[in-house]
Every structure is written in structure tokens, then in C-alpha cells.
Amino acid sequence: MTRPTTFPLHLVIAEHGAWRVFFAALNALVTRDAKAAPHVDTLPDHIRRDIGLPPRGSPLPEAPVMPVRW
């Protein structure tokens, strides 16, 4: 779920009314998103590459070891 831009509550109530805002907030608390994000292992390789993951079955890349500078 993406988080919308926040507005001061008193302005939202002034524009839409207290009961409508109350029931919208209650509805948002009670209901939940029916569509969950897919698990990373089920994504196709081209989407995995787009988000920076290696293709399925290949080992994870190792992070470069930076020398410690004291």
C-alpha cells in the first residue's frame, strides 16, 4: 500500500465532514489489501534484474571487501 501525502486532519474534516472521515478511517483499519506482493523467488529473471537481484539459480554476488582505514 502506498502512503498518500499527509494533510492536516482538521482540513480534511472541514472539506469532507467528520462522519465521512471517521468511516473512511474505520474502513481503512478494518479492511486490508487483498493482493499481497509476490514472493521474490517467483519473479521472472528480467524483473529480478530490474530490482538488482541476480537471475534465479545463480549465486548471490559477494560484496567487495573494503580495506579498513584507521
Image (spheres, grey):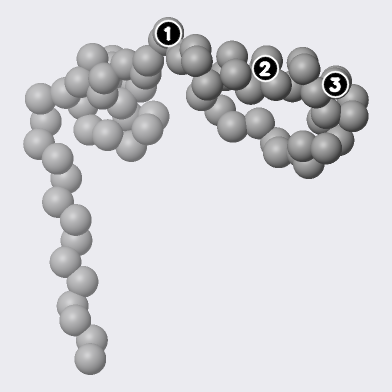
Indicate whether 66 appears above or below 23: below
Please give the name of the residue rendered at 32% of the width and 29% of the height, measured from the top-left corner.
49
Q: Position of residue 32 (x, y in %)?
A: 46, 15
The three-letter code of the residue at mark 1 reads: Ala
Q: How far apart are marks 3 and 2 (CA)?
A: 11 Å
Look at the numbered discs 3 and 1 and tell me whether their residues touch, using CB distance below 8 Å. Answer: no
Residue beneath the point at 90% across and 25% down: 15
Q: Which of marks 3 and 2 is nearer the N terminus?
A: 3
**Structural distance between the alpha carbons of marks 1 and 2:** 18 Å
Tell me where residue 59 appears, x and y as whole percent.
9, 36
| Rendering quarter of residue 52 | top left
Q: In which quarter of the image is residue 48?
A: top left
Q: Is residue 21 shown left or right of residue 32?
A: right
Residue kind at label 2, given as amino acid type: Ala
N-terminal-most mark, 1 or 2: 2
Q: Earlier in the sequence, mark 3 or mark 1?
A: 3
Given residues 39 and 44, the one toward you in this image is 39
Within 10 angstroms of label 2, few (less than 14), some, or many (20 or more) residues? Answer: few
Would you name the residue on which mark 1 appears?
A: 34
Q: How many marks?
A: 3
Which is more toward the observer, 1 or 13? 13
Query: Helix, strand or loop at disc 3?
Result: loop
Residue at the extreme front: 19
Q: What residue lies at 33% left-to-right and 20% top-to-bottom?
A: 46
Q: Residue 24 carries which label?
A: 2
Disc marking residue 17: 3
Residue name at image x 63 percent, y 22 percent:
25
